[in-house]
Structures are given as C-alpha cells and as structure tokens.
Amino acid sequence: MRGRGEGERVAGLVLIAPAPDFTAELIEPNLTEGEKASLFERGYFEEPSEYSPEPNIFTRALIEDGRHYPNGRGDCEDFALEKRRRLMQKGFSAGDLLMTVVRKPDGEGHAVLTVRTAQGDFILDNLDGGVKLWTQTPYRFLKRQATNHSGHWVTIDNSAEVLVGSVGQ
C-alpha cells in the first residue's frame, strides 16, 4: 500500500496462521545420490545460489526437522513467508514486506517479517502474538531483504541511532 501512496491508510495489522513445512515433500525426494551421500558423510550438502557466490547449504537437521512438522505447522521462516504472501494478496507492496534475520537474546538465529508503514517498521513474529515496532522487540537485527529487490539482502547497522530501514556498508 505504501508503494501506491496509501501507507497512511494502514491502521493495524492482522497476524496470519502458520504455513506448512514442505521440506520433506519437496527436497528429500529430489536429492541426488551425491547429495544423499554428502548428508550422510558431512551432515550437509551444497547447492549453487543464483543470488550469491556462496552456495545454499542444506543440513541433515533441516531435512530431519521437516519430517516432524505436520501440515499446518512450520518454522519461523515458514510463518514469515506465509504472512508476507497473504499481506501481498491484500495489497501490500513486496518492498514493504521484508524477510528479516535477527538474533534472539539467547543467541539463536530467527526469522521475522518487517512491515514498513508510514507509522514505522513493525515486526510480525511467530514467537510473539503481538505486532510491535522493531525497537520494542528484544532482537538484534542482522540483515533483511532489500526494498528494491527481494533476492538481495542488506546488512543492518545496529548502532542506536540507525533505523531498521537503514543499511550499513
């Protein structure tokens, strides 16, 4: 909506139900013999990335976790992606719905959805039922999708005076 000049119309956000995890259905049946051997021997396999010189890494833990999620459930990334998809169906601009990587207070990595509005950047998080300004979360923000290209990621400067929408070098 912000992309269409209607950002001021957003009065609130609705949390969306979780998305299913299709790891076991989509990745595991399509593994090559070499990828299966790498998972067994090294605990991971690599796949070239079209967005980065660094490969995508798929771990044995990812595959095993995918087996444990029944339909209607998923991990933090699944939740954020499904919320993003549904908000885009409601008219939000993809440039205002940014997948974001954060570090939780316990040091664990986590994915949330940043929703950019005229009232500020809000976080939709499967670990918290509320919608909060990014400054009201306990997280350290690491990187997020670029506003102009969802396949590019930008590092977030965590100095106190920099907003989540700003990027560092």
Image (cartoon, helix red, strand yellow):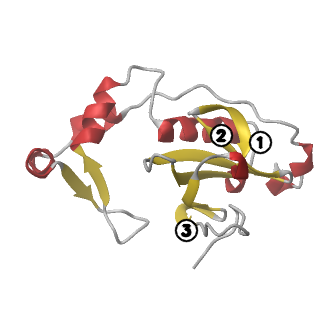
Which residue is located at x 69 percent, y 42 percent? 88
Asked if labels 2 and 3 touch by Cβ distance under 8 angstroms, the answer is no
What is the x, y in percent for residue 114?
Answer: 66, 49
Q: Nearer the viewer, mark 1 or mark 3?
A: 3
**Which label was assigned to residue 3?**
none
Q: Earlier in the sequence, mark 1 or mark 2?
A: 1
**Which label was assigned to residue 91?**
1
What is the x, y in percent for residue 91?
Answer: 77, 42
Q: Earlier in the sequence, mark 1 or mark 3?
A: 1
Which residue is located at x 58 percent, y 50 percent? 139
135 vs 160: above or below: above
- The alpha-carbon separation of the residues under discs 3 and 2 comes to 19 Å
Which residue is located at x 57 percent, y 35 percent? 82
151 vs 37: above or below: below
The amino acid beneath tag 1 is Gly
* Residue position marked by numbered label 2 in the rendering: 124
The amino acid beneath tag 3 is Thr
User: In which quarter of the view is residue 9 placed?
Assistant: top right
Instruction: Tell which of 162 and 11 is nearer to you.
Output: 162
The amino acid beneath tag 2 is Leu
User: In which quarter of the view is residue 26 placed?
Assistant: top left
Q: Residues within 10 Å of mark 3 (few under 14, many from 20)?
A: some
* Residue position marked by numbered label 3 in the rendering: 155
